Image (cartoon, helix red, strand yellow):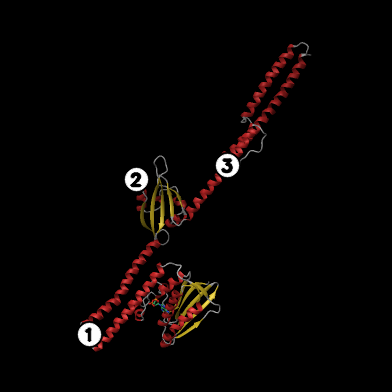
Amino acid sequence: MFRRRLLWRLFAINAAAFAVFLGVASAWLLSDPRQGGTGSIVAALVGMAVLGLIASFFAALTVYRPIERVRRAAEDLAKGDLNARVDTIGPDEVGDLAEAFNTMSRQLRTRMAELEGRRREVATIMENISEGLLLLNPAGEVALVNRAAQKLLGRRAADLVGKPLWQNLHLPEVHEMIAELPKIDEPARVRIELAAAGEARVAEMVVTPLFEISDGEKRAVLLIIDVTEDRRLDQMRRDFVADVSHELKTPLTSIKAYAETLLDGADQDEGARRPFLEKIVSNSNRLTKLVADILDISRLETGRKDDSRERSDLNALVRRVVGEFSERAAKKGVTLAFEPAAAAPEAYVNSEDMREAVENLIDNAINYTAEKGTVRVALKVADGRITVEVADTGIGIPADALPRVFERFYRVDRARSRAMGGTGLGLSIVKHVALRHGGNVEAASEVGKGSTFRILLPAA
Ligand code: ADP
């Protein structure tokens, strides 16, 4: 009650004005002998004084109340209640003040909503980008850390925020970069191995200084880019070049050796000439097949995706491929069966690539199946997916080798594959073709019982 100083001040002003009026009135009344007895005058004056005080109080209250309402609303706003507003007050200056306050509060609400929207946008981007992101304050402590960074560093935000990075992580190269921050203007980067994410990952750590603090202190952003996949691809490319060189070298060396032997006089020997020439031809064929497969792989890997695809009936396409192999299967004493799909299996395919993929599967199945064995080629359509299945009753593939058979140049038995003219690239081509068509491949096998390969494709 006594905190309402304005009310008491207004009351005091009213009361003082009334007291002056009462003083003048009582002086006048008491000095006029015509006015009755002094007792009744005093009683009347006391009565007036009491009524006057009450009136003064209520008069003060009517001025005070609306101002108090505005004050309270302002206090609520200051405390953070953005919905604070003053209900309509009469059309006077206090009413105008209340209206101005309501407008201000409304604008503040809109601005805050905009700011919050923007903050949320930034937070959503920060949380969802695949790169790890940390904001470091001028003291090198972590101010913010996103989800990807927590995952890559194997630490939770609670462990990192508010502390220098070195306290939680042993990354000497990164700490060195952070220590150098006051001296650098350009982003600094270093490539390191992170073991924290469960599996070993390679990350590029980029520290970028942020200039926005007037006193010259720098905050910084630490970006963690997972480059494991890039490095794996680099390694694969290097391996591929090494493998290709190695694979090309073997037949080339043979050709050279046989040719040189012939030049050295073996061409005069009737018995040796023919087998030597045959070796040269078979190695040349092998080279040709290798180069053709390598070109296929590189075309499938680097070529444009929207290559000439058309809606095709896979029943017809696969039937034709099976037809091409019937003679070879019959010669080897292997039964080659074809089971088309009941419903027309239509898909958007590059017929040439698809034919090559199916050829590779059937070629392998016949190659790795002994006499009296069976190779069954079947098509199925289910749930918008087409399956091209090639199952054989051949030698099978050991369980530890099965996950690797789609790798380039991988062969379970190198000598055997080579003897059959294999390049180790057939299944790799099959997988590339399937992936390029939005599909995939599967393999199941049991040693001594047979293997089943499947190409899964989305139906048109
Ligand atoms: P290759 O030219 O050697 O046949 P592929 O990439 O076609 O190369 O196959 C890789 C390896 O997978 C083969 O060397 C072979 O060991 C194994 N393989 C593929 N298909 C079969 C199959 N139907 N039965 C048994 N092994 C197979």
Percent coordinates x, y for residue 446 in the rendering? 44, 79
Q: Quadrant of residue 328?
A: bottom left
Whole-number angstrom distance, CA of label 1 to CA of label 2: 75 Å
Which element type, helix, strand or loop, lies under badge 1?
helix
The residue identified by callout 3 is 107
The image quadrant in which ligand 1 is located = bottom left
Which element type, helix, strand or loop, lies under badge 3?
helix
The residue identified by callout 1 is 266
Percent coordinates x, y for residue 274 in the rendering? 27, 86
Residue 200 in view of the camera: no
Percent coordinates x, y for residue 206 in the rendering? 38, 53
Q: Amino acid at mark 2?
A: Lys
Which residue is nearer to you in this view: 436 or 431? 436
Q: Are marks 1 and 2 in contact (CB under 8 Å)?
A: no
Residue 417 in view of the camera: yes
Whole-number angstrom distance, CA of label 3 to CA of label 2: 43 Å
Q: Are marks 3 and 1 in contact (CB under 8 Å)?
A: no
Q: Residue at x 38, y 51 (%)?
A: 207
Q: Quadrant of residue 401?
A: bottom left
Which element type, helix, strand or loop, lies under badge 2?
helix
Which residue is nearer to you in this view: 301 or 120? 301
Comes first in the chain, label 1 or label 2: 2
Q: Amino acid at mark 3?
A: Gln
Find out if the beta carbon at label 3 lies less than 8 Å from the nearest ligand 1 atom. no
Q: Residue at x 62, y 40 (%)?
A: 85
The residue identified by callout 2 is 183
- Check disc 1: other Cα within 10 Å, few if <14, some if 14-19, many if 20+: some
Horizontal side of 102 relative to 132 (left or right) equals: right
